[in-house]
Image: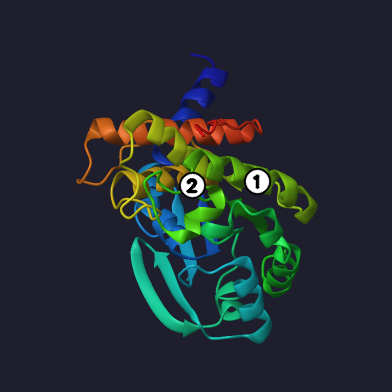
Amino acid sequence: MNCCKITLILLLSLFCFFPLQAKIIRVLAIGNSFSEDAVEQYLYELAAAQGDSLVIGNAYIAGCSIDRHYDNLRGDSALYAYRKIIGGVKAKHNGVTLRSIIQDEQWDVISLQQASHLSGIVTSYTNLPLLKRLVQSYTTNLHVQFVWHMTWAYADDFTSDRFKPYNYSQSRMYHNIISSMLNVLPSVGIRRIIPSGTAIQLMRHRMGNVLNRDGYHLSYTLGRYTAACTWCEFLTGRNVDGNKYWPATITEQEAQTCQQEAHEACFMQSRNSYVIFYNKD
């Protein structure tokens, strides 16, 4: 055996004993109950199952809109519930300012989103450039990446007045969310989108009306797991289809379906492509 072959075998052996370093990603969601649905359960475990480690923060106020986040940050208002997951353990702190949350970590990724009932109304995004600029002024990581969390349309049987602007049509709301993103985000300098809304819509066409627990929040099992799968693939860049983690509350087959649709949504997003589900009305 020549010297080159011996060297190659030794190098391969070293890779077996010393695998490539896993990714450590610090991600902050500036959101509301829709970011709670997406990042506060299952996401850490999914990443850990593929060898990656996440530090997850969620700046939470129920139903919080772009305008309210902006006003809160300008006024340094201590109104947030700060949920933070490190090592799979969640800590909750109430009465926290958004500024202190932003400065708590050198976040690699910060996601912004609109309140769900406004997500398909393009005129509601007026203060998004100002919010992004102000958040960026308080960040401690010069290379932080701003991304957009695409929320999901409501269930077709939801009867709340907040659904009225979309004529109580799920497909119309989904279409309007896409239209709003395409009209607004390029001018704000946000180029990457976490396509939770597309993943949920794809799942609805596979499994029916089982993704929501109350017409707008996600179900505790399939809905939240699908959103977490979408975030996991987006953040880590690894194909979530085949991930070995799923909660005991769903079956392996259901988990595979969630993973497949989350991967499909991320793949479509990477190609700047969207599935359009046409209105029935």
Query: Observer-nearest residue: 15 or 233?
Result: 233
Query: Observer-nearest residue: 19 or 41?
Result: 41
Relative image position of residue 281 (x, y in whole percent): 51, 34
Task: Tell me how far mark 2 sits from mark 1, CA to CA.
Answer: 19 Å
| Label 2 neighbour load within 10 Å: few <14, some 14-19, many 20+ | many
Q: Which labelled disc corresponds to residue 24? A: none
Q: Which labelled disc corresponds to residue 192? A: 1
Q: Amino acid at mark 1?
A: Arg
Query: Observer-nearest residue: 152 or 78?
Result: 152
The reply to whether discs 2 and 1 touch (Cβ–Cβ < 8 Å) is: no
Residue at the (42%, 47%) spot, across then down: 227
Query: Considering only vertical position in the picture, is 35 above or below 98?
Result: above
| Residue carrying label 2 | 153
Query: Observer-nearest residue: 35 or 117?
Result: 117
Relative image position of residue 233 (x, y in whole percent): 49, 41
Query: Considering only vertical position in the picture, is 138 above or below 129?
Result: below
Residue at the (34%, 60%) spot, across then down: 88
Left or right: where 227 falls relative to 117: left
Query: Considering only vertical position in the picture, is 96 above or below 125?
Result: below
